[in-house]
Amino acid sequence: MDQRTVSSVIAGRPVAGAPGGRIRSTNPARLDEVVADVALGDATLLVTAAQVASDAQRAWADVPAPVRGRAIAHIGRLVEDNKQALAALVTREIGKPYPEALGEVQEIIDTCDFFLGEGRRLYGQTVPSEMPDKQLFTFRNPVGAVAVITAGNFPVAVPSWYIVPALLCGNSVVWKPAEYSAATAAAFHELFCRGGGLPPGVFNVVYADGPTTFAGLEQALDAGLIDKVGFTGSSEVGARIGELAGRHLQSACLELGGKNPMVVTASADIDLAVEGALFGGFGTAGQRCTSLGTVICHESVHDEFLTRFAEATAAAAVGDPFADVLYGPMLDIRFSERFERFLAWIGPQHKIMGSSGIGRITAANPRARFAGDPEAGIFCHPTIVDGVRPGDKIFDQETFGPLVGVTTYRTLDQAVELANAPGYGLSSSIYTSDASEAFRFRRGVSAGMVSVNNSTSGAEAHLPFGGNGKSGNGSRQSGQWVLDQFTRWQALNWDYSGRLQKAQMDVAELTPDHDFRL
Ligand code: NAD
């Protein structure tokens, strides 16, 4: 297998040396396979990248938007032509099953397809003035140089949600991907720069660890080199990024963690709900921001749902992500170690189901129907925890990994209350055949995204994506909605009357007859 050396790329040139040290990005399904040697940058390198992006931005904004749209079109086609190769790299580097990795790459293509036409739209408005011989207009202006920091569980789809519209709108970018998906990030960056023919400095990539990134970002903000921050990652780090941006009078685009509820009502199609829970809870080993957190089951169907869900989970294939499996390894060793800490939250009041063991799958802690050699990588048992309630950490907090809680409710109001209780608000789902229940749930749930008779995962590239509460600050990605993240509205008024007409004061008033009656 090929192993590449990955370095930051600033102004179109790979950075020599590794001021932040070197790490190895390994295949989590075969830990002895190194996917990339990664040279990390330091805070100064991030500032340099921000300076370069800032310098390059104005010329990029001068490229007509339809021409930038053509660049996005070419990028989309090049990604399409390299779809299998990029998906295979995603599977090798973070262990996402290959069919899901293909879907992940498709999301870049879909995003490019959406935004290539936006280059010919990017509409402003003409607005009537309250005075004669005066015209009002609005324009969308690019924000400037954008810093994008992303997690590695969606190593190319989520970055494309930022980078495609940011570039299309005339911004320049400094991207800081997750360290453990660096080879995938390098391939993405190369496809964008080559496919788009982007001028040097418009799209830069810097590899760095978290604390270094924070220090570099702070310095770049202090120096006025970054005009917008996009951050996808944990709620904890997101809060710090939001605070940092706020101190610089900026509002970051924050896409954070989730504790996504799925309500199974008395009228639900249980087979469908089980299928949705399996995919939502355990797909990508439960390491999606939209992964199912807790199933909130009507008490009349709890036993039936739980039995079938536990059977389906026990029967599911886990293992080699290139084989036909429900899920593969954890993204990286740090996630399996953290998952062990989440498992310690399971208490005596809880009932565990779904597998022949919990925690790491090994020869001594085996899993039936495992595809491949569990000891070669970092694989974890799927775990269903029945009987979770508010106040249990396992109910209240995101447990990034293959773990699904189950609880019960009696009235729909209680279900909504339970759905909102953890304080996140990313995705949610309800299984019901009663339209009024679906709409009452939609209205009450705090989530930015609601699925009816569908799992909590599976966003389409042209609907607003984003969360509330601990899941984000209300920013939305995707479709037309993300344009408000990467442009600022500018209002223009043009008076051609040849005199000073004062708004609110020099405005003609017609005389109404308020006493008129029929
Ligand atoms: P994380 O917050 O630890 O890391 C995310 C990114 O931020 C990485 O690139 C990391 O290097 C960087 N980072 C870490 N500490 C930093 C700091 N102090 N300053 C600046 N950058 C820092 O997140 P994680 O645990 O690696 O990723 C999983 C989390 O991301 C989960 O909570 C998941 O739900 C969330 N996520 C959210 C979305 C979404 O769209 N809402 C999508 C994917 C993942």
Image (cartoon, grey):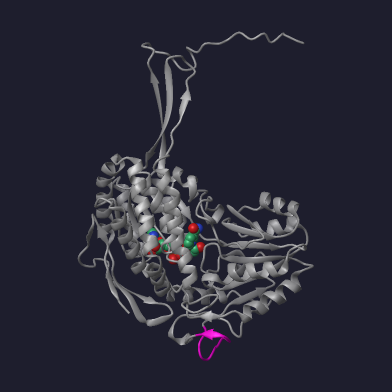
The percent position of residue 133, horizontal first and vertical second, equals 42, 15
Taking depth in this image into account, of 71 and 297 the one nearest to the observer is 71
The percent position of residue 267, horizontal first and vertical second, equals 77, 62
Above or below, comparing residue 143 to residue 397 in the picture? above
* Residue located at (43% from left, 21% from top): 135
Ligand 1, seen in the image, is in the quarter at bottom left
Magenta-colored segment: predominant secondary structure: loop
Q: Is residue 27 magenta?
A: no
The percent position of residue 216, horizontal first and vertical second, equals 31, 56
Q: Which residue lies furthest to the right in this view?
A: 300
Q: Which residue lies furthest to the bottom in this view?
A: 364
Q: Which picture quadrant has residue 12?
A: bottom left
Q: Is residue 96 left or right of residue 214?
A: right
Q: Which picture quadrant has residue 454?
A: bottom right
Taking depth in this image into account, of 158 and 86 the one nearest to the observer is 86
Q: In this view, does 262 lie to the left or right of 85?
A: right
User: Total marks drawn?
Assistant: 0
Above or below, comparing residue 83 to residue 304 in the picture? above
Q: Does the magenta stretch include residue 369?
A: yes
Quarter of the rendering occupied by the N terminus: bottom left
* Residue located at (72% from left, 8% from top): 515
* Camera sees residue 324: yes
Query: What range is drawn magenta here?
Result: 361-371
